[in-house]
Image: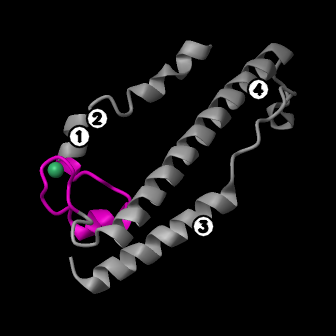
Amino acid sequence: MTGKQLKVLRAALQKLRAQALLTGPAPIKPNTRDETQVGTVDEDAQALGEMLQVLSSQRNKGQKELLARIDAALRRVNDDPDDFGRCQDCEEAIPVKRLELMPYATLCAACQTKRDPQRGAARKKITDYQ
Ligand SMILES: [Zn+2]
């Protein structure tokens, strides 16, 4: 990775970090009737409210994790720039295109898929709350 690429990625990380901090945790909506759901019965509105609460708390959690990943990547870029962008599993260089989209990535796409095959399946667990 060139010094210029590192500089670009560090700037991208700092921008992402600022955005994540600016957005902050999503407020948890009180369980009130959603005005956009006119015509639905109260039971439906309540179910929707509960679902929104679950989604909101999941979003907060995701955002906190993202911020931690961004911070870790910034540390790597500063402390260990020679190794930045190297996949933690196979130690191949992560393609710069992937890093430009996800500068906090620690794995190449292939290793990410191997390590995290359940990704997406976890989202379906929202039905557990219903
Ligand atoms: Zn890899």
Q: Residues within 10 Å of mark 3 (few under 14, many from 20)?
A: few
Residue 113 is labelled as 1
Name which residue lies at 71% across and 45% down.
Answer: 26
Question: Does the CB distance between marks 2 and 1 fall below 8 Å?
Answer: yes
| Mark 4 lies within 8 Å of ligand 1 (Cβ measured) | no
Q: Are marks 3 and 2 in contact (CB under 8 Å)?
A: no
Residue at 20% of width from left, 55% of height from top?
87
Secondary structure found at label 3:
helix
Please, what secondary structure does the residue beneath circle 4 have?
A: helix
Q: Which residues are magenta?
A: 86-110
Q: Residue type at mark 4? A: Gly
Q: Earlier in the sequence, mark 1 or mark 3?
A: 3
Name the disc covering residue 17, or none.
Answer: none
* 66 lies above or below 121: below
- Provide the residue designation for mark 4: 49
9 relative position to 35: left or right: left
Identify the amino acid type marked 2: Asp
3 vs 4, front mark? 3
Q: CA distance from mark 3 to mark 2?
A: 27 Å
> In the rendered image, which residue does mark 2 sit on?
116
Q: Position of residue 36 (x, y in %)?
A: 81, 37
Query: For residue 18, which numbered disc appears in the image?
Result: 3
